[in-house]
Structure formats: structure tokens, C-alpha cells
Image (cartoon, rainbow, N blue to C red):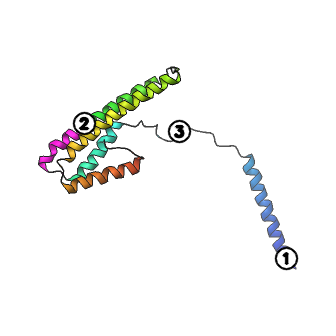
Amino acid sequence: MKRISTLSSIVGLSLLAAGALAIAADHAPLPQPGPAKHAPHKRFDPVQHTRHKLDGLEAKLNLREEQKQAWQAYSDAALARAGEKATAMQELHAKRSEPRQELDTAAKLDKAAEFMRAQADRLQKVARDTRAFQQVLTPEQQTIFDLYWKSQQRRTGGHRPA
């Protein structure tokens, strides 16, 4: 009987202590927010991103000396496109604070069609540059090239060759 009394005293004191801690936690002052502890958001740099992808691809291809001129033309074209994209992104960012021009439906559709034509032209240039480069590759290198870009598409959700 003395044992049950001691056990119930211990349980009672434990519950009392837990309740006191809960009440104290409810009334404790909240931590004040301090300065941000993370680095500022870094903007996406298409040129740096493209250069990184091209460096990875070049290392995997093990290009021979006679292929390096074609590689240089391919990578220069890819970096030029990335530079154009960076410029377009900067212009778009600068326009964010400007009020948007309200267009009617037909004008919006015309603008979308113009954008799609420009995208199709850019994609055609990518295909032409890629085809020219792939012509100097061995069959093994072509397989590596195709597998590399396929892995990039999976990783980036459909990103095409630079």
C-alpha cells in the first residue's frame, strides 16, 4: 500500500511539473527576429550556367585536336545565345516596375505568335549549330553528347542544348 502511495505521489508530482513547464512555455517571450542569416538571393546567370554545362560536356567528350575548332564554334554560339538571354532577362527585370500595357485579346495573341516565331528561329539555330558540331564527332562521342543532353533535360525539366 505504501508503494502505491509513493507511486501516485511520483506520478502526481510529474504531472504537476509538466503542467508548470507548459504554462511557463506559454508565457515565455517569443524570440525577436534578427537580421537575415542567409545570403542574398543570387540571380540566375545564363552565361555562367551555359559555360558550366559546356565545360562538363567537353570533359566527357575527350575531343581530339582536329575536333577542337568545331567545338569552339559550337561553344561560342552557345555562349552568345546565353549572353542574349542574359540581356533579355535584364531588360525584363528593368521593366518590372513599369506599368503593364493593357492589350486586347487579338493583340495578345499576335504578341504570343511573334514570341513563338522568335523561339522557333532560335531553336532552329541551336539545331543547326548542334548538327554541324555532331558531324565531326565519332559515333561514341555522338552517343556521349546525346546522353549528356538527355540527362540535362531530365535534371532541368526539358532544358535543351546550349
Of labels 3 and 2, earlier in sequence is 3
In the image, residue 93 sits, relative to residue 12, either above or below, namely above
Could you tell which of marks 3 and 1 lies nearer the N-terminus? 1
Give the farthest residue toward the front: 106
Disc 1 crowd, CA 10 A, few/some/many (<14, 14-19, 20+): few
In the rendering, which numbered label is found on residue 51? none
Residue at (40% x, 27% y) in the render = 114
Asked if marks 1 and 2 touch (Cβ < 8 Å), the reply is no
Residue 136 image point, x, y percent:
16, 48
Could you tell me which quadrant the N terminus lies in? bottom right
Residue bearing mark 1: 4
Instruction: Provide the secondary structure element on which disc 2 rests.
Output: helix
Q: Residue at x 27, y 49 (%)?
A: 57
Whichever of callouts 1 and 2 sits on the residue coming sooner in the sequence is 1
Give amino acid for label 1.
Ile
3 or 2: mark nearer the eye: 2
Q: Is residue 23 left or right of residue 161?
A: right
* Residue 138, position as x, y percentages in the image: 18, 54
Q: Which contiguous range is marked in magenta?
A: 63-75
Measured along the vertical axis of the image, is residue 97 above or below residue 142?
A: above
* Marks 3/2: CA–CA distance: 40 Å
Density class for disc 2 (Cα within 10 Å; few <14, some 14-19, many ≥20) is some
* Residue 9 at x, y percent in the picture: 83, 69
Q: Which residue is mark 2?
A: 77
**Cα–Cα span, label 3 and label 1:** 54 Å
Instruction: Give the residue at mark 3.
Output: 36
Name the residue at 40% across, 51% down. Answer: 154
**Amino acid type, residue under disc 3 in the picture:** Ala
